[in-house]
Structures are given as structure tokens and as C-alpha cells.
Image (cartoon, rainbow, N blue to C red):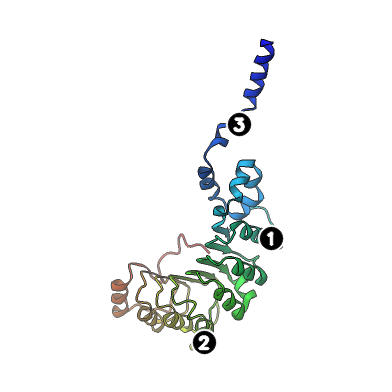
């Protein structure tokens, strides 16, 4: 009997839960947060029941990052399904979402309808072009908590700014990043800058990468956005900083990147 008991104990010892699985859920959440949404849904949640429970917690989906997934190729419609699944898991608690080429107009409306607490939205030109101006306006108007917007290769027209002026009056951060070259007439080069100056008086952080504005547009921004503390002008080569503008920037802005500063560390 004793021998049998000893054998049972030995068997039980081999079935003991590995120490790493007994870590508090808070530590696991911290670790898993470092993965993107795609990695969590594809692999992490399937590792063990502990991880699956952690991955189902709405707090895990306050940030949904599907921007730079670089794993095995996934069909765009599968990525869209994953994003919808992540939105459902967030239970309306998502505050930051980053979407890439796969996002459709229908997905962006889905996000807007179910993410009333969303504070930051990042999308690429592919998403913006599918929305077009009217769709973009509708999405933003459905996000009452939105404070930060990041767009790559998308141009916001003056009419769109005008339509959203009330919705954007409390905006804190705007990023407009140009990658491809776009031909603009002399009447259009300052359009975005003048619209920003008119519509976003509370803006604190502005990134205009490779914008076509001139000194006129920059002056309007400095006058119209007195609360700016961070300004990124890298690649804005039509701006010619004279003594007056340079002095105004140094007095008003704490964190400045000038047109010819290095692009190192910039995320396209």
C-alpha cells in the first residue's frame, strides 16, 4: 500500500502546474499587452486556459493595435473579422485603435457605433479613401470622446474641417503624415494648415510630416493654436523659417522638430 501511495505521489508531482502559470493575472496581462491584437487572437489566447481568461478580459482591449502586423499573410477580410471580435471583447472600453489597409468603410462605422469612449483613432489612406469625406465626417461625429487623430497619406479638406468644427473644438492631438508625393496648386498648399488654425484652437500636439504649407500656413497655426506644446514640421520644405517665425516658435513651443530634422524613429 505504501508503495502504491508513493507511486501516486510521484505521478501527482509530475502533473503539478508549472510555476510560471501561477503568476498573478495582472502580470500576465502586462506581458500579453505587449503583443498586438492579431498575435493575441491568433496564438496567445490558445496557449493555456489562464491566458485565454486573461485575453477575454475587456481591459485587455482598451488598446487595439492592428497597424504593423508583420506575421504570416492574412486575408484582409480575416483581419476585419479579428478587429470586430476585438471590439466585441472590449465591451465599449476601447480608447485607442490603430487600423491599417484592411479596414473597410463598414468596419469603421462598426467601430464608431461601439466605441463611444474612443480617444485616439489611427488610420491609413486606404481606410480614409474608402470612407471619403462624408463617411469620415460621420465616423468622427459618432466618437464624442475622440481627442487624437492620426492619418497617413490622407488629406482633410477645409469643408471637412468646417463640418467637424464643433466635434473637434476640444481636440488635443493631430498627426497628418504624407508618404507619397501629391501635386497641389498654389491655392491648395495652405488649405490644411489654415483649416487647422481655424478649427482646432485647443490643439496641443501637431505633427505635419511632408506637408506642403508655406510660412503663411505655419503663421496661421501658431496664431490659431495658442496651446501648442509640440510641433513636428519634418519634411515641410516649403516653410522658410525667418527670424520672426523662429522666435515665435521658440517662445511658444516646447518640443519642436524642424523641416530638415532627421526622420529617424519616425513610423510610417
The residue that appears at 45% across and 61% down in the rendered structure is 264
Pick the residue in front: 104 or 86: 86
The residue that mark 1 highlights is 81
The residue that mark 2 highlights is 185
Front: mark 1 or 3: 3
As drawn, which residue projects farthest toward the bottom?
A: 187
The residue that appears at 39% across and 84% down in the rendered structure is 216
* CA–CA distance in space, label 1 to label 3: 34 Å
| Image quarter of the N terminus | top right
Pick the residue in front: 56 or 176: 56
The residue that appears at 57% across and 54% down in the rendered structure is 58
Residue 243 placement (x, y as % from top left)? 29, 78
Dot 2 or dot 3: first in sequence order is 3
For the residue carrying disc 3, how many other residues have a C-alpha within 10 Å: few (<14), some (14-19), or many (20+)?
few
| Mark 2: secondary structure | loop
Which image quadrant is residue 238 in?
A: bottom left
For the residue carrying disc 2, how many other residues have a C-alpha within 10 Å: few (<14), some (14-19), or many (20+)?
few
Residue 112 placement (x, y as % from top left)? 59, 69
The residue that mark 3 highlights is 17
Dot 1 or dot 3: first in sequence order is 3
Look at the numbered discs 1 and 3 and tell me whether their residues touch, using CB distance below 8 Å: no
| Mark 3: secondary structure | loop
Amino acid at each position: 500500500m505504501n508503495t502504491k501511495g508513493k507511486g501516486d505521489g510521484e505521478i501527482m508531482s509530475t502533473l503539478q502546474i508549472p510555476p510560471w502559470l501561477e503568476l498573478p493575472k495582472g502580470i500576465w496581462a502586462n506581458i500579453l499587452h505587449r503583443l498586438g491584437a492579431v498575435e493575441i487572437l491568433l496564438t496567445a489566447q490558445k496557449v493555456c486556459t489562464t491566458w485565454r481568461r486573461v485575453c477575454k478580459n475587456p481591459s485587455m482591449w482598451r488598446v487595439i493595435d492592428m497597424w504593423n502586423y508583420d506575421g504570416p499573410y492574412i486575408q484582409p477580410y480575416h483581419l476585419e473579422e479579428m478587429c470586430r471580435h476585438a471590439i466585441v471583447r472590449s465591451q465599449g472600453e476601447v480608447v485607442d485603435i490603430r487600423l491599417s489597409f484592411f479596414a473597410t468603410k463598414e468596419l469603421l462605422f462598426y467601430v464608431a457605433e461601439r466605441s463611444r469612449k474612443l480617444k485616439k483613432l489611427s488610420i491609413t489612406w486606404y481606410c480614409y479613401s474608402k470612407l471619403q469625406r462624408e463617411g469620415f465626417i460621420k465616423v468622427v461625429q459618432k466618437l464624442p470622446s475622440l481627442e487624437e487623430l492620426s492619418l497617413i497619406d490622407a488629406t482633410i479638406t477645409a469643408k471637412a474641417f468646417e463640418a467637424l468644427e464643433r466635434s473637434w473644438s476640444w481636440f488635443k492631438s493631430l498627426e497628418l503624415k504624407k508618404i507619397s508625393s501629391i501635386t497641389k496648386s498654389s491655392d491648395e498648399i495652405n488649405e490644411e494648415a489654415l483649416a487647422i488654425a481655424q478649427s482646432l484652437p485647443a490643439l496641443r500636439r501637431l505633427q505635419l510630416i511632408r506637408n506642403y504649407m508655406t510660412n503663411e500656413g505655419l503663421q496661421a497655426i501658431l496664431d490659431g493654436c495658442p496651446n501648442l506644446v509640440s510641433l513636428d514640421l519634418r519634411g515641410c520644405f516649403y516653410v522658410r523659417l525667418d527670424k520672426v517665425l523662429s522666435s515665435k516658435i521658440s517662445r511658444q513651443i516646447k518640443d519642436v522638430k524642424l523641416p530638415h530634422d532627421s526622420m529617424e524613429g519616425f513610423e510610417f
